[in-house]
Image (cartoon, helix red, strand yellow):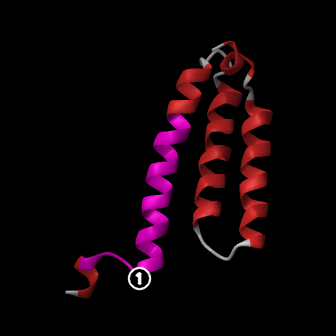
Amino acid sequence: MEMFYILNHWHWWALGALFVLGELITPCVYFVAIGIAAVLVGLVTRFMPEMAGEWQLGLFIGLTLISTGIARNKRRGGSPRQKA
């Protein structure tokens, strides 16, 4: 588990950039959503450098679930409430 203690904001920003570049190769919204989640974790880590790596990873997973849910909803054309 020592691997998670070396994560800093640059790692998250690089991961976010890789996901956004992956979006250029595959035309879907999900890589951008995951990239945004990684960049947001990088911002949090920048201002809270003492945050443990496990918490960073948990935050990344949570933000990824939220952002991909929003992307899936946008891709399907909005929420069902708007269509009714």
Residue 26 place in picture, x, y as percent? 70, 73
Query: Residue 43 versus residue 79: which sits nearer the camera?
Result: 79
Check the image and report above or below for 60 versus 77: above
Residue 27 place in picture, x, y as percent? 67, 77
Q: Quadrant of the N terminus?
A: top right
**Looking at the rendering, which quadrant does residue 42 occupy?**
top right
Residue that appears at 41% across and 79% down: 76
Q: Quadrant of the C terminus?
A: bottom left
The residue tagged with tag 1: helix, strand or loop? loop
Q: Mark 1 points at which residue?
A: 77
Residue 73 place in picture, x, y as percent? 40, 71
Q: Which residue lies furthest to the bottom in this view?
A: 83
Disc 1 residue type (three-letter): Gly
**Does 80 sit left or right of 59 as displayed?**
left
Q: Is residue 41 magenta?
A: no
Residue range (magenta) = 59-80
Residue that appears at 60% across and 54% down: 34
Residue that appears at 45% across and 69% down: 72
Residue 40 place in picture, x, y as percent? 62, 43
- What is the magenta segment's predominant secondary structure? helix
